[in-house]
Amino acid sequence: MSLFDWLNGAENEQEPAPMVDAVDKLALYQRAWCPYCERVKMVVGELGLDITECDTTEPDHLQALMAGGGQRMVPCLRIEPEPGRYVWLYESADIIAYLRRYAGANK
């Protein structure tokens, strides 16, 4: 939920991101200079996850992020719960919480 949604009184009714059975179904869209991306990458390393990183300074990655997620904001975790279907998770805190749940569920 965006700040504008919250200010307008919207409730956070977003469904939780679906869990996947393999790390190759996750991709992190990020930029090197982004402190929130660095925070997420630190947790990825801490959990020992080998997640594909897509640098949005590369036009193809930025285009994919915009087409799929609808925003150019990073970090963004692309989750593929089934072939050809993607869920785009923004906000570093939400991504970190998801990765911690994912790592715990796949031990």
Image: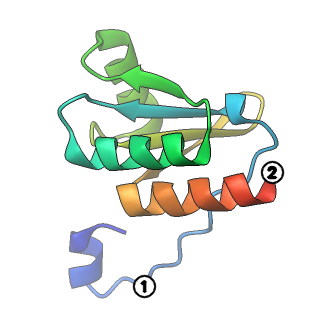
Residue occupying the point 60% across, 59% down: 100
Q: Amino acid at mark 1?
A: Glu
Residue occupying the point 61% across, 30% down: 50
Residue occupying the point 42% across, 22% down: 54
Residue 47 x, y percent position in the rendering? 59, 48
Read off the residue under disc 2: 106
Left or right of residue 26: residue 60: left
* Quadrant of the rendered image containing residue 18: bottom right
- Quarter of the image with the N terminus is bottom left
- Secondary element type, mark 1: loop
The residue lying toward the viewer, choosing from 31 and 81, is: 31
Alpha-carbon span between mark 1 and mark 2: 31 Å
Where 35 sits versus 63, above or below?
Answer: below
Where 92 sits versus 54, above or below?
Answer: below
Read off the residue under disc 1: 11
Q: Amino acid at mark 2?
A: Asn
- Secondary element type, mark 2: loop
Residue 82 x, y percent position in the rendering? 78, 37
Left or right of residue 61: residue 102: right
